[in-house]
Structures are given as C-alpha cells and as structure tokens.
Amino acid sequence: MSIVANVVIAVIALLHLWFLILEMFLWTKPSGRRAFGTTAEFAAQSKALAANQGLYNGFLAAGLAWGLLLGNGGAGFSVKLFFLGCVLVAGIYGGLTAARKILLFQALPALLAIVLIHLA
C-alpha cells in the first residue's frame, strides 16, 4: 500500500480525533460553538448527545490507527477498508442530514483513501 494512502488515512484519523475533542470537550465552549455554529443554549441542551457523537468519532480514529499499525497486508488492509467505509457512510449520512460541508471534510477524504488503498 502506498505511503500516500497511509498518510491520507492518518490525516483522517487525526481529523476524527479532533472531532472527538470538539464534541466531547469543547462543545459548550466558544470555540466548539463557533465550529458548529450553535448557540450557548443549544450547546448546553445537546451536550450529552454531542459527547456521544464524539465518542463514535474516537472509535473511528482508533480503528484507522489500528489499521495503520497492522500494516499494509491482509488484516491491515481489511481493517483500514472497514473503518474507511464506516467514515464514508457516516460522512454521506451527515452530509445529507446535518450539513453539506460534512461531505467535503469526512466523506470525500474517506472515498479518496479507499481509492488509494485499492490502487496501491
């Protein structure tokens, strides 16, 4: 598998780690509210929901990191493909139901990584 594919996968994992931080720890802070365009009242009311969502993003980051640690062969390829597929589906769903920018920041990078690991 190409180094480029692994770099893209690592960036996606780091993005999802950042999403975890935003949703679990910064949701009600000014930086978190600014990132998601929410009010203080909405952020306070939805804090538990956002933390749950952040946890799921953490699982995606952990799975991608696990795939990178397994390497480029059999199990590593399969784990990367599975978690990239999860990221892609979550990104498409989020892009269609929550905010179109999710397609750009989540779905598109996952699709690119899936193509790259198949070309390698």
Image (cartoon, helix red, strand yellow):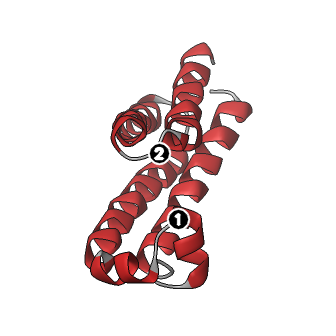
Q: Residue at x 39, y 33 (%)?
A: 92
Residue 9 placement (x, y as % from top left):
59, 42
In the rendered image, the vertical position of residue 18 relative to residue 67, given as above or below: below
* Label annotation for residue 105: none
Label 2, on which residue? 67
Outermost residue on the top side: it is 119
Q: Would residue 50 appear left or right of 9 to someone viewing this image?
A: left
Foreground label between 1 and 2:
1
Outermost residue on the right side: it is 4
- Circles 1 and 2: CB atoms closer than 8 Å: no
- Secondary structure at numbered mark 2: helix
> Does label 1 or label 2 sit earlier along the sequence?
1
- Secondary structure at numbered mark 1: loop
Residue 67 placement (x, y as % from top left):
47, 45
Which picture quadrant has residue 62? bottom left
- Give the class, few, some or many, for how many residues have Cα within 10 Å of label 1's Cα (few <14, many ≥20): few
Q: Residue at x 52, y 42 (%)?
A: 106
Label 1, on which residue? 37
Kind of residue at badge 2 = Gly
In the rendered image, the vertical position of residue 102 relative to residue 92, given as above or below: below
Q: Would residue 56 appear left or right of 9 to someone viewing this image?
A: left
Kind of residue at badge 1 = Gly
Q: Residue at x 51, y 35 (%)?
A: 103
Quarter placement of the C terminus: top right
Residue 1 placement (x, y as % from top left):
62, 27
Disc 1 from disc 2: Cα separation? 33 Å
